[in-house]
Image (cartoon, helix red, strand yellow):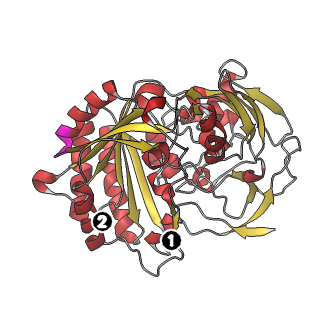
Amino acid sequence: MSQRLESWGRYPQATPAKVTRLTDRHAPLPASDLPLLVFGNGRSYGDVCLNDGGHLLLGRGLDRFIAFDATQGHLRTEAGVLLSEILDHIVPRGWFLPVTPGTRFVTLGGAVANDVHGKNHHRAGSFGHHVRAFELVRSDGSRRVCSPTENPDWFAATLGGLGLTGLITWVEIQLRAIEGPWIQAESRRFANLGEFFALAEASDRAHEFTVAWVDCAATATALGRGILLSGDFAPAAAGQGKWPKAHGLLTVPFTPPLPLINRFSLKAFNTFYARKPEGRFLTHYEPFFYPLDAIGYWNRIYGPKGFLQYQCVLPPEVAESALTELLARIARSGQGSFLAVLKRFGDKPSLGMLSFPRPGVTIALDFPMRGAKTLRLMDELDEVVAEAGGVLYPAKDARMSNRLFKFSFRCYNRILPFIDNIFISDFGKRVNLRVG
């Protein structure tokens, strides 16, 4: 069966691929004369989940819960279970994910393969720090349980390994205890990047969760202005009454012929957002961690050509100057990002060979795909990141060069012996991350 599957950024444009739905974690991999890749829920922004002309294994069929120790907070499920499904099961029982990305609609296997991070990296590290074990199936039929102590080299290669080491069938994670679903949050404005760094450092010391929004349309003395959001899980007494329903899901019903993000809508949005009130407030965890999940298919607003997300991490010693240059170039281009998310990573070393998080400051930016001028801007941003000694995030990337990848991940050759010779992605082809 052939199907056209897209990444969340919808760029590059999807091409038909042979697909097979996985349903039995005990079964061998399907025989194929085409290169394989597991496709989870399609929430990777770039092409790490695509396999042009190849064979995609649909992982969402591996969606069973296997074991849950409600005393210790140990949860084992198949790799195709969504984080949203896990949360629905564990939050009423007093547990939460130890680390969560900005959407809950990713598979557990995808969270491992991309070693995702969240708003609490300065406290908890990345997702891989809380993975107790997983099973990896190779195309030669071999199976191995991987953990920090059992097959630790395979664990390190697969964690953040972008799905290239084989099929993850199940994952066991350590959860964190909570008293309820409420977050005690605080919102504070900052006028420039200097103020951001001062506020963020203090926030990281005081709070478990910290993230900032930056106005990419601002220039001159307002360059780098934004809002810092911090928070912590509230005690049980903070939230009274019934468990709240999930916040309402609006849906973008169709793809408009042109992007709805333009110079005028961007300026209006940023001006409105910059005026949001400051202060402390109590909120449910869903709008705090997953604000965009409230809008179904929000990626359609970027039009039929999709969008590029650009996420990098910059070393702490040059982060402020490099961010200033990045934002200045974006403002001059007139292609400001609708959503610009800024946060600091802590010093906890990642466990995966190709894991993205490392000490420094990370910024994530969305740009409507407008052809050559958008790609030229990306190249300009690459120059700033490379000069600063920074790194791009493969899970969000759709156009990083082989040269920049090898510059960013200088130990990339460590993973090569662990890559399955039948598994490949469009990203892997582009940066020549394959066996042989």
Residue 14 placement: quadrant:
bottom right
| Nearer to me, 399 or 7 | 7
Residue 270 percent coordinates (x, y): 26, 61
Mark 2 Cα within 10 Å, few/some/many (few <14, many 20+)?
A: many
Is 219 located above or below residue 352 in the figure? below
Q: Disc 1 versus disc 2: distance between alpha carbons?
A: 22 Å
| Nearer to me, 178 or 80 | 178
Residue 77 percent coordinates (x, y): 73, 37
User: Residue 169, labelled with which disc?
Assistant: none
Residue at position x 52%, y 56% from top?
A: 45
The answer, for residue 220, to whether it is visible in the render is yes
The answer, for residue 161, to whether it is visible in the render is no
Q: Indicate the quadrant containing the N terminus: top left, top right, bottom left or bottom right.
A: bottom right
In the rendered structure, which amino acid carries the disc numbered 2? Answer: Gln
Front tag of 1 and 2: 1
- Residue 74 inside the magenta-drawn segment: no
| Nearer to me, 286 or 348 | 286
Q: Give the residue number, with chain letter if any, for mark 2.
A: 335
> Which residue occupies the extreme front position in the image?
241
Q: Could you say whether the residue bearing mark 2 is in a helix, strand or loop?
A: loop
Q: Give the residue number, with chain letter if any, for mark 1.
A: 252
Residue 234 percent coordinates (x, y): 43, 32
Bounds of the magenta span?
190-195
Is 329 located above or below residue 121 in the figure? below
> Which residue occupies the extreme left position in the image?
221
Is 151 located above or below residue 238 in the figure? above
Q: Indicate the quadrant containing the C terminus: top left, top right, bottom left or bottom right.
A: top right
In the rendered structure, which amino acid carries the disc numbered 1? Answer: Val
Residue at position x 21%, y 54% from top?
A: 328
| Left or right: where 170 falls relative to 254 | right
